[in-house]
Image: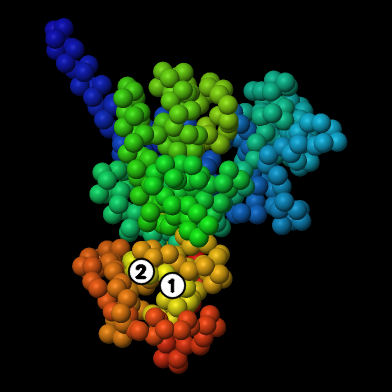
């Protein structure tokens, strides 16, 4: 074979190696197209797949920081009668961080199990979870490596994820449309599962809120209004627009590096983009080297595991029926409309005029504060309110002088042109009391939707 022919063959093999999406061993995992799936992080992805789909919320899984396949113990908080803290808590009495007592007991069991294994090479009676696999790996570790520093724990999330799947069906079509329009990968719709389990009211200790868990500073940077009456981080549609703006800005930035950009872009969503630029430069844009060696401020286990968490969520929720055993596809989203009010109104006034139960209006509009729903403050003029279209369509002929604009959010219903709908003049007269009763026909009409939304939210 000539030198030119050899080079051509060599380059063709390289193209095939880098372009074909690899299929990995565990549970039919396929790397999403356009994303990088380094072999080094796949054990972590497999472990997190179990956390999301196998272990319940009341179960706590104790494992090893170096090898996620090493699961030492699965504790049940219900059986123990208390909550287990995975993070070490600071003790003023001792002046240092103290691990959970169960974590100390597990270390003692590991040491006893190793002693048993060294006497009887077969197995140990103390190893309950996958003892054959764990025994082989424990024997390879020196005594100094069997310390508390390498024991970690995770709470199961399968129950929370089941609830999130129901909420996901409501928001999925809207998010899919927006991602497609922006030219972003469809798999990003699975990110809110690890952020909030698709709960718009979810919050964190870092003051992050909403489906996409924006902190106030980042939310305002990307155009979200946050004040005493409205927090658009909880608005599913507007917070999705902000998340898309973040991905478009920072993925383009990381694409300048000679590497796959999504591991860095998604990790920056958790760690912060400016800190991620510093970490990426430190590792010369080598993602695996970065998560294994970078020791920057706040660059902890949550940050290192964020991209593997996303891959695990993509694997689990792209085949929901397989992992959760139910036909969630039968849950159809409720078509909603967007109303733009021209004047200030109390929430109960709008609900009454639309023959809509206030709880349904509240469930569809998590962006408004308690001040709005307790009737202490009015909804500001030009605010957008989401309502279910069946209620709007049924009352369209009876509405009055206020102009209301609405449009359909979800497929397969067609986009309805913005219309000006007159609202009954009754709204412009004396305010309706919050406890005003609906007529029998109005109550019957809203009963079914109220039941659905209480189940959904």
The answer to which image quadrant residue 332 occupies is bottom left
Q: 235 above or below 149?
A: below
Q: 253 above or below 369?
A: above
What secondary structure is found at the residue carrying circle 2? Answer: loop
For the residues bearing labels 1 and 2, Cβ distance under 8 angstroms = yes
Where is residue 137 shown, x and y percent of the image?
Answer: 62, 28
Q: 112 above or below 58?
A: above
Q: Which residue is mark 1?
A: 345
In percent of the image, x 72 and y 27: which residue is there?
A: 147
The answer to which image quadrant residue 140 occupies is top right
Where is residue 65 shown, x and y percent of the image?
Answer: 61, 31
Residue neighbourhood size for the residue with mark 2, other residues' Cα within 10 Å, grouped as few (<14), some (14–19), many (≥20): some
- Residue most toward the right? 93
The quarter of the picture where the N terminus appears is top left
In percent of the image, x 43 and y 57: which residue is there?
A: 235
Q: Which residue is mark 2?
A: 341
Where is residue 237 shown, x and y percent of the image?
Answer: 37, 56
Residue neighbourhood size for the residue with mark 1, other residues' Cα within 10 Å, grouped as few (<14), some (14–19), many (≥20): some
In percent of the image, x 35 and y 84: which residue is there?
A: 425
Is residue 308 at least partly visible in the picture?
A: no
In percent of the image, x 39 and y 85: which residue is there?
A: 426
What secondary structure is found at the residue carrying circle 1? Answer: loop
- The one nearer the camera, 302 or 129, is 302
């Amino acid at each position: 074979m000539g030198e030119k022919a050899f080079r051509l063959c060599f380059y063709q093999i390289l193209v095939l190696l880098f372009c074909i999406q690899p299929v990995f061993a565990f549970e039919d995992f396929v790397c999403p197209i356009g994303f990088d799936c380094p072999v080094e992080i796949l054990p972590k992805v497999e472990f997190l797949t179990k956390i999301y789909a196998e272990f319940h919320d009341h179960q706590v899984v104790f494992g090893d920081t170096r090898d996620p396949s090493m699961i030492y113990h699965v504790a049940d908080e219900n059986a123990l009668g208390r909550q287990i803290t995975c993070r070490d808590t600071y003790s003023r009495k001792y002046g240092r961080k103290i691990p959970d007592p169960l974590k100390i007991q597990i270390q003692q069991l590991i040491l006893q199990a190793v002693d048993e294994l060294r006497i009887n090479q077969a197995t140990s009676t103390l190893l309950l979870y996958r003892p054959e696999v764990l025994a082989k790996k424990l024997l390879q570790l020196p005594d100094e490596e069997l310390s508390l520093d390498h024991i970690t724990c995770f709470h199961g999330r399968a129950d929370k994820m089941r609830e999130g799947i129901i909420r996901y069906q409501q928001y999925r079509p809207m998010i899919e449309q927006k991602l497609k329009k922006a030219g972003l990968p469809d798999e990003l719709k699975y990110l809110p599962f690890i952020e909030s389990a698709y709960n718009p009211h979810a919050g964190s200790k870092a003051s992050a809120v909403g489906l996409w868990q924006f902190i106030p500073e980042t939310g305002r940077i990307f155009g979200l209004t946050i004040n005493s009456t409205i927090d658009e981080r909880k608005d599913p549609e507007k917070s999705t627009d902000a998340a898309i703006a973040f991905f478009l800005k920072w993925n383009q930035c990381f694409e300048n590096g000679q590497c796959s950009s999504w591991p860095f872009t998604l990790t920056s969503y958790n760690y912060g983009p400016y800190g991620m630029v510093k970490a990426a430069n430190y590792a010369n844009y080598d993602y695996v080297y970065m998560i294994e060696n970078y020791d920057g401020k706040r660059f902890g286990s949550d940050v290192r595991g964020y991209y593997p968490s996303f891959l695990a969520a993509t694997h689990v929720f792209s085949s929901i029926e397989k992992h959760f055993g139910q036909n969630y596809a039968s849950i159809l989203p409720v078509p909603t409309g967007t109303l733009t009010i021209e004047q200030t109104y109390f929430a109960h006034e709008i609900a009454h005029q639309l023959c809509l139960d206030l709880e349904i209006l509240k469930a569809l509009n998590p962006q408004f504060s308690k001040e709005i729903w307790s009737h202490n403050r009015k909804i500001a003029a030009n605010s957008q309110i989401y309502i279910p279209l069946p209620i709007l369509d049924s009352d369209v002929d009876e509405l009055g002088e206020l102009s209301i604009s609405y449009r359909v959010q979800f497929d397969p219903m067609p986009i309805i042109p913005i219309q000006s709908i007159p609202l009954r003049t009754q709204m412009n007269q004396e305010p309706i009391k919050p406890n005003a009763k609906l007529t029998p026909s109005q109550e019957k009409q809203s009963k079914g939707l109220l039941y659905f939304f209480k189940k959904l939210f």
